[in-house]
Image: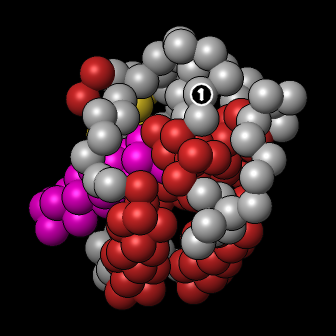
Amino acid sequence: MTPAERAHAINYLTETRENLLDSTIRLSQDQLQFKPAPDRWSVAECLEHIIVVENRILGRIAELAQGPADTSKRSPFEGRDDSLAQIIAGRVDRFPAPEILNPTGRWPYHRLLPEFRMARGRSFDLASRVDADLRRCFFPHPVYGDLDCYQWLLLIPAHGERHRAQAEEVMSTPSFPRAAATR
């Protein structure tokens, strides 16, 4: 990873962490668990999904960074990292999450933000310290094909932004509980 790529990844991780915390830190348990419809996720479910996905992507990047580089592959988004991140964050393409990534109530409400902070801390740590050439490590995205691990590193904050926007849609629902937060 070049110094510019490292700085970009760290800045994007920081910016999106702050966006998510600003949006959710003052929510009460009632607000976190509110669902605008039975088939829609609550804010808590969005948070849980963000955490689970971040941990899985990060684990896969760390694993692949330990192995040999693959010079035979190319990402379909080569040279277009920002476009890929915008597509993910902007919710341009919508598709259901794989079952394993769906929220199941893995953590109680009061643990969601600490779990997010821990996951994001691990992402910062990897972005700050990894020495491997992440541009030569690949794994497939279910929709976008083989992406290099640097692109996957950028997908962590882009994915968080995607679901922060989803959570804000929930919070903008007219029936969202407007009572003062209890935290």
Q: Quadrant of residue 173?
A: top right
User: Residue 83 location in percent, x, y?
Assistant: 73, 42
In the rendered view, would you say 118 is above or below 146? Answer: below
* Residue in the image at 33% along x and 55% along y: 108
Magenta part of the chain: 46-69
User: Residue 130 location in percent, x, y?
Assistant: 33, 80
Quarter holding the C terminus? bottom right
In the rendered view, would you say 73 is above or below 41? Answer: below
- Which one is in front, 37 or 68? 37
Which residue was labeled with disc 1?
35
Q: Left or right: 140 with respect to 77?
A: left
Give the dominant element type of the magenta stretch: helix, strand or loop: helix
- Which one is in front, 39 or 101? 39
Q: Is residue 18 magenta?
A: no
Q: Which amino acid does label 1 sit on?
A: Lys
* Residue in the image at 36% along x and 35% along y: 103
Sort mark 1 into few (<14), some (14-19) or many (20+) by Cα contacts within 10 Å. Answer: many
* Residue in the image at 58% along x and 46% along y: 30
In the rendered view, would you say 53 is above or below 16? Answer: above
- Which one is in front, 125 or 177? 177
Q: Quadrant of residue 154?
A: bottom right
Q: Is residue 68 magenta?
A: yes
User: Residue 146 location in percent, x, y?
Assistant: 39, 33
Q: Is mark 1 on a helix, strand or loop?
A: loop
User: Residue 67 location in percent, x, y?
Assistant: 13, 61
The image's colouring method is secondary structure
